Amino acid sequence: MTLRIFVPSDAAALSMGANAVATAVQAEIESRGMDAVLVRNGSRGLLWLEPLLEIETPDGRIGYGPVAAADVTTILAAGAAGAHPRKLGRVDAIPYLANQQRLTFERCGITDPLSLDEYSVHGGLKGLRRALDMTPADIVKEVIDSGLRGRGGAGFPTGIKWRTVLQTEAPQKYIVCNADEGDSGTFSDRMLMEGDPFALIEGMAIAGIATGASKGYVYIRSEYPHAFAQFNRAIAVAREKNLLGRGILGSSRDFDLEARLGAGAYICGEETSLLESLEGKRGQIRFKPPLPAISGLFAKPTVVNNAISLATVPVILAKGGGFYRDFGMGRSRGTMPLQLAGNIKRGGLVERAFGLTLREIIEGFGGGTWSGRPVRAVQVGGPLGAYWPTSLFDVPLDYEAFAAKGGMIGHGGIVVFDDTVDLAKQARFAFHFCAIESCGKCTPCRIGARRGAETMDKIMRGERVVQNIELVHDLCETMRDGSLCALGGLTPMPVVSAMEHFPEDFDRGAAHRAAAE
């Protein structure tokens, strides 16, 4: 039996030298005359162990990591049964992975990302085959019943969008995947497109069948060249195997898609700016109404969903909406891929049902800070998410529970800071970030963010601190209520939360007086 050796081709693994490891593995296979094959899989999401080399055995895959090219000779000489300093044992038994509930990411890191046969053997295409035997209305109902909400930030029910597009008459409709993953500390879209691209393709095809759309676009951020190249390779395989094109999988349904590369604008993560960019225009916010579901891409009814939302649809159709709905809590159903980043000991991807707490994520999975110093703050939901102190770490991961405390889950990015962080600087960064990323269409965002950064500079210099903090609060209220989109509307969230939970970082004069005493 041919031995299979796995080395990830995921961008995170590549950044840690995975290509050099893969080259060394291939050289050893050839020099030893081994009956073995090298498989470039996706990442399992245990990023502190990358590059993670795995050897397949009858009892499961044995992992080694983090591996350097110089380790390969001794690893293969010892064999999977032998001892080695880098040996981790069975990968699926590592607690970080064993304690997860992987539904959307069930194949990521396990299969060859470009093998449609492996995808099918591991449960792929079951959802699409079932959808081909259903009416569009029944597919939409299944998605609504599952409770799936958008995983891109807003948390809007996915099935409601689909139903609107289905019920809107038009000769042409579109499915648009928002893979412009620009939030700090997020990488789940990239991991999926590099490690299990057929899941996204299958999800988009199901969305097309459900709504009557025959064409799809995947909008990928320019900073993801590996994901863009991998996804285009997957599209070519899908067309060759009749997963895309005319009469998909031998049915009477047509659906095709293509990938488009963005140009580095954070604002194009907002759905209407993304549509403008896809049409070849400057990425600027559109006024609503009309909603994209009524008049979207090229003024046609358009489903705009995040990559994770669409890639979750196949498991819902394969196992039923009720199966998916049984995970989670309240109105937050199913699982959420959380991404641990920042000052964290064990960074990576954790997929778990809604309901676990930040403490369980940061301490249980993340293992605390990389620096070994105490955690002081965490930001969930990207650069526009709230800064929370440890006193809020027992809030359950739930859209409504987070909103009740002035936070948001967003795309699931969790950035950890130790006790050396300066929250006044972080608040100033929020204004600065908004200023440079604003599309410029509305005054509260375009001008407010710049005035906010200037006022924060005064506060940090100790100038009229009380009055300027009051001014920042007024400015945040204007931006929140007057901005056209979430960029300006959410910028106040990190600013206000930092001032509320870490007031000592804003009165520099008080800090200096305390030090003098």
Image (cartoon, rainbow, N blue to C red):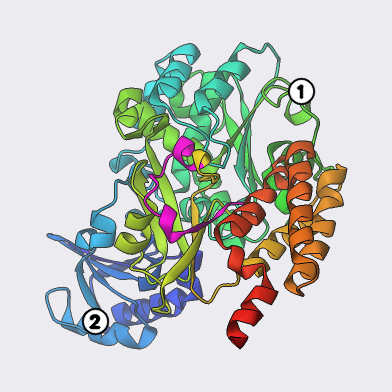
Mark 1 and mark 2 in contact? Answer it, CB < 8 Å.
Answer: no
Residue 445 or residue 41, whichever sits in front: 445
Q: Position of residue 388 (x, y in %)?
A: 51, 56
- Mark 1 lies on residue: 289
Q: Which of 23 and 143 is in front in this view?
A: 143
Question: Tag 1: Cα neighbours inside 10 Å, few (<14), some, or many (≥20)?
Answer: few
| Left or right side of 411 for 434 | right
Disc 2 is placed on an element classified as: helix
Q: Which of marks 1 and 2 is nearer the N terminus?
A: 2
Quadrant of the drawing holding the C terminus: bottom right
The quadrant holding residue 510 is bottom right
- Please determine whether, in this image, residue 85 is positioned above or below residue 185: below
Magenta segment, which residues? 384-402
For mark 1, give the secondary structure.
loop
> Is 189 or 122 nearer to us in this picture?
189
- Furthest residue in direction front, as rendered: 517
Please report the residue visible at 31 percent of the width from the left and 85 percent of the height from the top. Answer: 71
Q: Quadrant of the N terminus?
A: bottom left
- Residue 75, label in figure: 2
Separation of residues labelled 1 and 2 (CA atoms) = 60 Å
- The three-letter amino acid code for the residue at tag 1 is Pro
Inspect this view and state whether residue 3 appears. Answer: yes
- Going by the image, does 146 lie left or right of 180? left
